[in-house]
Image (tube, rainbow, N blue to C red):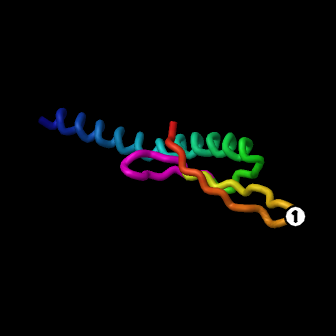
Amino acid sequence: MKTLRRLFCSAVLASCMASLLAPPAFAADCYAIGQQIAAQNGGTLAKASSSTQGGRPVCVIVVLVPGRDGERPRRAEFVVPQG
């Protein structure tokens, strides 16, 4: 019984550690997606973060797009699915 308990505890600990390590990978994916969106819109990536909307993982991307005729940059926010 002790062996089974140790095995179960090890599995739970490994699962928790994996979930702690997962968000940076998602953040890296969101950063890459943000770079692509910024390039497509001719702007600069200001922020890329992962979030959950409707139970699904998404990337929230904020791009600063240059203003027209010397105006200040516009802030454009994009929400795209992760992956």
Q: Which residue is drawn at 75% across and 55% down?
A: 65
User: How many numbered discs sit on the rendered protein?
Assistant: 1
Magenta stretch: dominant SS? strand
Residue range in magenta is: 48-59
Residue with the most extreme left position: 1
Q: In this view, does 82 lie to the left or right of 35?
A: left
Pick out the residue farthest to the front.
69
Up-down relation of residue 74 to residue 21 (above or below)? below
Left-right relation of 16 to 29 = left
> What residue is at 62 percent from the left and 41 percent from the top?
33
Quarter of the picture holding the N terminus: top left
User: Residue 30, position in %: x, y?
Assistant: 58, 44
Residue most toward the right?
Answer: 70
Please tell me in which quadrant of the rendered image residue 57 appears. top left
Q: How many other residues sit within 10 Å of disc 1, few (<14), some (14-19) or many (≥20)?
A: few
- Give percent across and percent down for residue 18: 41, 40
Find numbered disc 1 in the image and state the secondary structure of the residue it sits on. Answer: loop
Question: Of residues 39 and 70, which is closer to you in this image?
Answer: 70
Q: Does the magenta stretch include residue 70?
A: no
**What residue sits right under mark 1 in the picture?**
70
Q: Where is residue 51 in the image (x, y as percent from the top left)?
A: 48, 52
Residue at (33, 42) in percent of width and height: 13
Taking the image as shown, residue 70 lies to the left or right of residue 17, namely right
Closest to the observer, 21 or 31: 31
